[in-house]
Each structure stands twice: as C-alpha cells, then as structure tokens.
Image: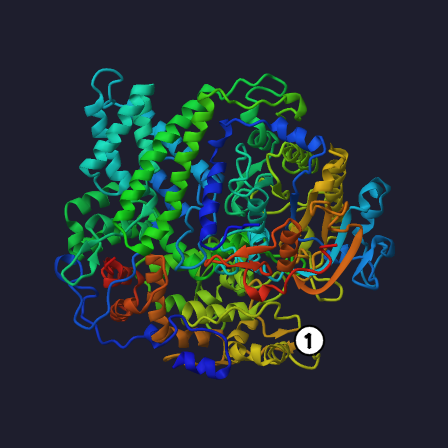
Amino acid sequence: MLALALATAGCTGVIEGGDETTFPADETTSGEPGGGSAGQPAAPAAGATTGGRSIVRLLSQEEFSNSLEDLFGASFTKAELPYGGLAVTTFASPPEDFVGTSDFEKLARITERVAGQVVAKHQAGAGKCAETGDATACVTGVLQAQGRRIFRRPLSPAELTSYTKLYETERARKGNLAGLTLALTGMLQSPFFLYRAEVGEETASGLRRLSDWEYGSALSFLITRSTPDDTLLNATESGMLQTPEGVREQVRRLLGTKRGREGVMDFYMRWLNFQRWDDVEKDSKLFATFSSNFKQSALREFSNLIDREVLSGKGSFKELLTTSKGFVDTHLAAVYGVKAPATPAVTELDPTTRAGVFTQIAFLANTSQVADTDVFHAGALIFKQVLCQPFSPPPVNPFDTPFTPDPKLSRRQNLERRTTASATCAGCHQFLNPVAMTFDAYDPIGRHRTTADGHDIDTRGEVTLTKDADGPFANLPELMKRLASSEQVSECHVKHWLEYALGRPSDEADAASIARTHAAFAAGKFDVLTMLSDLVLSDAFVLRRKV
Amino acid sequence: MKIPMKTLGNRIERRDLLKAFGFAGLVAGSLMDRRQAFANGGTPPRRLILFYKPGGFFEECFEPEQVPGNDVPHGMVTFGKVRKGARQNVLDVLEDPKYASILGDVNVIDGVDMRSVAAQDAHHNGIRAALRGRPNGEGDEGPFPGMSIDRVIGLHLFPDGGRPVHLKAANLNVGVGNFGNQALIRDCSTGGTGIETTSLSGVWDGLFKDFVPGAAGTAPTGPSPALVDSNERRKILSGHSRAELESLKRMLGKDEQASLDRHLEAMNEITRQLENDFKAASSGGASVIRGDKLPGRPEKNYDPKRDLVPLTADIVNIIAHGFLFDRIRIATLHTFGHNNGSSFWFPGSNGSYHGDVCHKGRLPDGKGQMFVMPAALSAGRTLIRMYLDMLLLLKSIPEGNGTLLDSTTVATFSDMSNGDHGFKMPTLFLAGGGGGLSGGKRVFRTGRYMKYSNRGHNDYLISLAHLMGVTDWKDAGGARKPLTQIGAARYNQGPLPGFAG
C-alpha cells in the first residue's frame, strides 16, 4: 500500500522491504519472544516463516582488532590493520571480503607479530614448554587452550592434530619456539578465526539452529564487537546458553562491559550517520563558537543521552526521541540558551524547541552543511532511520537546473518551489518537504532560530504515508512526539537492531521475529536493553534456513 | 584486448592481486633486458600516472578566460588572464618560462564535473569514489564491479600471462604522507600494491629491492636467507589455511561458498606463486641488474608536511625508473596527507589545512564559502608546479629516440572541484604521449585547451581507458562490448570527444 502510494505519486523512492511485509500483522505473537524449550526457540509454529539467510562474515576491522586486543593485549595502529576497505556505513552491510593485496601482507605481519609475542610471554611464564626433549605434549596443551579462545570453540581432534603437525614441521626446521609461533600464527590466519560462519545444527523442522558455540560468538560480536571472553566461553561450555535466563544473564553482563557500551554506542552512531563526525566543519566567521572542544561537548551530550535512555536500563526508546533534558556544559549552554552549569550536568532545556536526540546539537550539526542547514538530509534521515521508509537517492546534479530565488519569498517557499518544480523532484519532495522543512528552525550548529534570511521560519508540517504516524505538527518537538508514539517507528528500531546483528538487510523471513520482539519491546516500556535480550532469543537470530 | 569481467575477471584479478603479496620477488628475469630493449629503439609500453588532488581548491582560480570553441590550441588561450568576475588566475603558472618546453605536452580540460563522487565521500574517501566512478555508498554497477579504473588499465597494460614474471602488481598506489585513518587511500584500487610512506625507501624497495639485495651498485647475491626463511613459513601456512578454507566451504551452502571462493583463489595463488619462487631461487636464477642504473635506495625520512613537495618529486623520480625498468606501467599518487590523519594540509599554503583555507566565511556574493585567498592561490599554484615539474622530470629522462614523457600520460583527478565541497568543474590536466603513436604522431594531441559542457568525471575515466588501449570488455556471457561506461549508467554519457587524434 505504501509503495503503491509513492508510485502513484511519481516518487522514485522505495520503501525498505518493498511492500507491507515490512510491517507484518501480529499473528505470531507467542508471549516470550522466541520462547521455547531449553532457552532457544522451539521449532517454528506451522505457517510462520522463520529462519534467516545465513551469511559468512569476515571480521570487520574493528572486530579483528578488538579480538586480538582482548585475546592477547595486542594493539595496533589503524594503518597496520587489514580490511581497511569501505567503512561499514549501514546496519545491514557486512564488511567487504578480502579487498586488496595489502590485506594479505598486513595480516601476515600482524599475526606473525602477535604469535611471537604470545609465545615469548608464554615461555616467560611458569608453564612454559621445554625447549628440548619431548615438548609436543606441552605444546599440544597450549594449542588446545589458545585454539578454543581463537576459534571461539574447542578445536576438533583433527584440528588439534593438524596444528600439532604444523608445530612439529617448523620445529624440525627452526626449533621449538619457532614451531609454536608458526602454529599460533596459523590459527590467527585461519578462516575459522577470520570468518564468522554460522553453519548451525539441523532441527526437526528442517531449519538449522546455531550451535551453542556459534550462538555465544554471535552474542559477543553483536554486543561487544569482539570475540567471546573467557566467561562467555565457560558459560557456553557449561550449557548456560541453552536457557533464556542464562542468555539474558550473559547479555546483561556483556552490556555492562566497556566493550558492550562501545558496541551500543556504535549502533547509535551508525543510526544517526555519525561516522563522518570527525569531518564536520563550520564556517568560523558565522559560527565562531564552533571548535573542536564544542564538537567534543556535543558528542559527549549525545553519549550521555544514550547512557541515560539506553544503557542505564532505566530509560526508554520513546524518551530517546522526546526528552527535553540535555547534558550541558559551558560550550553548549549558549547555544541552548540556558545558564552554564559549573560542571557538565543534565539540564532541562526548552521543551518547545528540544525533544530528543534529533534536536540535539550533535545531530543538527552533523546533518548541516558548513555554512547552512541541510534540511533535506535531516528529513531523509527521519524517513530512513526512524520510519524505515527510505527514499531513493536524488538524481545526479539535482541543482544543475538554474533557479533564481525570489527575494520576496521565504527560504521555505523558495526551497519548495525549487524542489517541486519538476515532476522528478516533486515525486519524493512532496512527502519529504513537509517533514524536512521543520529542521530549518535550527542553524548549522543547532541553535534554535525563528527567522532566516530576513523571513520568519515556518516550522509546521505533516507526516504522511505512514502506518500510524500521519498527521500535522507545529514544530520539530511535536514531530518527534508524534513519531515516538508510532508503532511503525518502534518496530523500525527493532528492525535496525536485527539488521545490525545479522549484518544483512532483513527480509520477509525475519518479519515474524521483528513483530514478536516489537510486541515485547512495547510491553517492556521500550527499554532497549530488554529488547536486545529478546532479539537474541528470536528465531531470526538463532535459526538459519537449510543450506 | 582482454579485460577482466564480471565473472572471469574476478578470477584474473585475484591471481594478479596475489602477485603483490610479496612472494614474487625472487624470480629470474633481467630488468636490464627490458630497459635495454626500450633504449635500443623498441617501442616502449604505454604508461600512466594518475595524480590525485584532494580537498579542493578555489576552482574559479583555475579557469582560464572563456575562449571561443571547445578544443583550441594553447595559443588562443591566455591562461593567466583573469576571467570576468573572477579573482587571480593560478593558471598563470603555465606561462612561466621554466615550463615553456613542456607546455606543448599539456592539455587543460574544463567542464567535467564530479557527479559520481558523493558529498560525504570528499576528502577521506574521495579517491576511491573518483577511481571507481561511483559514490562509495553505492553498489557496483557497470562492466567492472569492484574495480577501479587504474586497476582496469593496469591489468590491460600488464595482462595476466603477458606480465613480466618479476612484476609484483599491475598497479601501484602511493599515498605520500601519513594518512592516519584514511585507509581508502591505500586500498582505493582493490588490488595492486598500496604503499603509504613518508620516505622513499618503501617505494624503492617495492620496485627494486628483490633485484638488488644490497645497496645500489653492489653485486646481486640472490635472495637473503631471512627472505627465504620467511617465504618458507608463509608457504607452509598458506597450504594449511587453504586446506581449512576447503574444509569450511564444505560445511556451507552455495551462496556462502561463493563468499569464500575469492579467499580460496587467493590462497591457491599464493601456494602456486611460492612454488614458482622457490624453483627460481633454487636454480640460482636471481636477477641481474646493475645498481648504478638506478637511483640509490634513499634513506632520508621526510617531514610529511614541510617536505611534501620535494618528497613527491623524488617519488616520481623513482616511479619513472620503475617505468624505465618496466616494473610498473601505472601509478596513482596521492600527496596531500598529513600526520594528524584527518585534515588535509595544502602545500604552498604557508602551513594551512583544508579548513583554514576553504571554510572561512561566505563569499561576498553570498553564494559560497570564503577562501583565504592568498593561501588558496598559493596552494593552487604549488599544485600546478608539482604537476609541471613531474612532466619536466619525465621529459628529462631519455628513452629510445625520445623521452619517458613520450610514452607516459600524466593525468590529474580529484574528489571535488572547490574546497567548499563543490562538485561542479575541476580543471584537469592531461599530458604526455602515453596514448601511443599513430603514423609517427601521438594519438593524443597535446597543447590544447579542451572545454566540455555538462560532462561527468566518468566520461573522463572512459576516455583515459580508451587512450590507454582499453576499448572494450567482455560480459559474463563472454560477449565483447565496447567500453562506454564506468560505474552506473546514470553517471555516463560516453567517452569525451577529442581524445583520439
């Protein structure tokens, strides 16, 4: 219906998912999301489409780096790391496969170095393997222990034999330590370390369920962007992940770690397109207060909001979109028009101009240009990231057609004339503009304003084409409140989290899991952390179609 | 000609890619033979240098006064003359007597916009988008998915099978300076050899080290024991990883298996390459090259900011010798990094960064960003001088009956036109005889001012590809098609007129 409406209107935009399957009827709700015996979902109910597509994921640069740091305390400069190809800019994109020759070279250098350091450290310890004599038994023990951590599962007997053989081959050539180093290097270059392959185990339904080890690994990479720690490995081995309670306990624990916090923050940075934050610049003559310190303050305010409304476990997704509380310091106070606190503090802002993350300085500065606002960028983000209704990219050189602003008209009127002059542009802009124009009430550093270029700013607008958020609004805070009360919006958020977890776009097979998790999200007063615990118990997360 | 395609092409690409892994250096083959062949009048191969200028300048200062016609000799253009309403014109550098000898080798190109580079790609990731002819966030379309134009041309210039056995990679990318988190500069070309350096030794080593184990001028001694040992280890590991990949593949479905195929091909190639290396090494076939014919291995460390101009010039000298000895035929240069990893420093701008120069308020007409004009003008002029000095150097190196410039095309490209992130029209420079000869004359006539209207950067890339001999491609079904498109169709109108004859 939605796609049809846009098509009828001549918009070339697409709605994610392509049709109404994006917002499935709630026919499969079954109480506990993904609830089933032994902690993992039972076989899907008849008629329900469950089990997602399986993909093999190369560790991203961050996952690779974090894993080596967490496993061995090794750290690297960005330039040393492989897989520095495309930054992952969407939730649904796994990193590229091996992209260049430099990847191989870097991988070889790093793994050789790390293995050398691990062996040196091991040999300096009490349990070192003897340099001479029959060291094989000792080395086999080392390989078994390290292999479990590196492969995120115990080595199979064949693998242990194979790595022991690798050790012996090099030992014959270069000695005991060289042999151990080579075997560990081999593990770090192994596809079983570099890739996350979810093979799963066959179930009676014909779908494949992640093994406990795969499941633990998936949890860890979702939450911490790193390899499972020893606690999680031990929990996995003990069968703890076979019960929902056990899973929830591990999820809570991981979310409380430094890596867990960074992982959640990573999601929200991607959600709001903050990957280019370092590049944000403003015209220093127009915005003298904008400095690197100002940027740090703005980002700190954003982080504080995520801490309060997501990570604390006491907030809610709705508040994330609507709160009028900021985290203000001397840099931000003037822009918000409040008195600067002595030390950075949560501060009540003007609720008629501020409501949630989309009215924060960080978001507004990030979506503006150097000297001017970019209302269409901000508006398009609302459609894509909040409503899951992205427009297709604008045509090449959209502003090539000459356009002379009429000085008698307001900025909004001129922008609307320009963007609806041709049928091509109007197709999307007729829906985008009524939402986007409200962002013009904030200048490029997020300061609220009522006039621009000598004209009053008209902040009124209307949401259309949504499942349940349609209607007029007077300004951006009203728009955010309207969106916050929408099921489409909260379900969209679940969908984004699932795509982030799976590293692929969701499809119709995931719809039931999204709907179930969303139902629980609503029942849990939109606590994101609880939702994450539900999401990782969902069919889409743990089941895979048969290969 | 054959160019890697959507399906077969990947296979070729991966094989080629592995030659850059660093195992290929021990094989027999005389560099001097190739050098000698060109010196004695043999036809040198076509060569290409892509000179990337990121960060934008004040493009208005690059445009010569409007002239009638769109393809006119330099004599009709006064480059230094200020266009109506514009400020100083940095093209006055072209009229410096120092460059009189090469002005006839240069074409100045206007009217080509950067439509296939997205605003968010500018600066850090612009080079990848510019070389691929598509925004970084877009999926692959067009005849060469996942490949950049320098890669496509490189594989044509050194096709698989016809490539000298000692060649490590079809294409070389050099990021001069320290680029910090700008990893795409190193990996922009998807394959090839990527070097990021603040010294010359890395580039020198990449091109010549395996053939001159000691210092320049010393007798070759063959591969060092350390290298032999390292290669042996890597050979053992590659075999092991290959077996594990096969094992993992067997556990997966068809789609997932395909994801691993590229990795597997790479490992297969590594294994094959290592075996060849060891055959060559064990037969005593270390190559013979007289070190005194090369510039010595430079040990100096350059300051990435203060020394950027001489560092770039010196690297070009090494690349030129890489051309002479046929170690490479295409090189991409990116020379604007700095050690803070995020801001671009402009050479010639008295220590200013991109933000200091390009984002300093509105222009008086209110239509754009104010530049710090003295710095912008100085940076623009310095850039042009760096480019022209490159040409002078190539022209000073004799080869056969002419000079290195006769067989080398040197092209500029960019991520945007203006420093305020405008994408309208970067002025481009294209020089040299890399397009080859026809009837004793260069195929690509130089000494011209070429003005186009509403043409995209992709058309420029296609024209460059044609100039270097890449005129067609094979689709997945094996059908040969003329090359008229790089990236998505919407960015293309076809090759620019005036590039051939």
The residue singled out by tag 1 in the image is A403
Q: Position of residue A79 (x, y in %)?
A: 49, 40
Q: Position of residue A41 (x, y in %)?
A: 18, 61
Question: Can you see residue A536?
Answer: no
Q: Is residue B289 left or right of residue B392?
A: left
Residue at 61% in and 70% down: A398
Say what amino acid the circle numbered 1 marks: Phe
Q: Position of residue B128 (x, y in %)?
A: 55, 51
Residue at 52% in and 64% down: A364
Q: Nearer the viewer, residue A200 or B266?
A: B266
Q: Chain of mark 1?
A: A
Residue at the outermost front position: B439
Q: Nearer the viewer, residue A104 or A70?
A: A104
Work out whether A39 lies above or below B405: below
Q: Nearer the viewer, residue B118 or B373?
A: B118
Question: Can you see residue A377?
Answer: yes
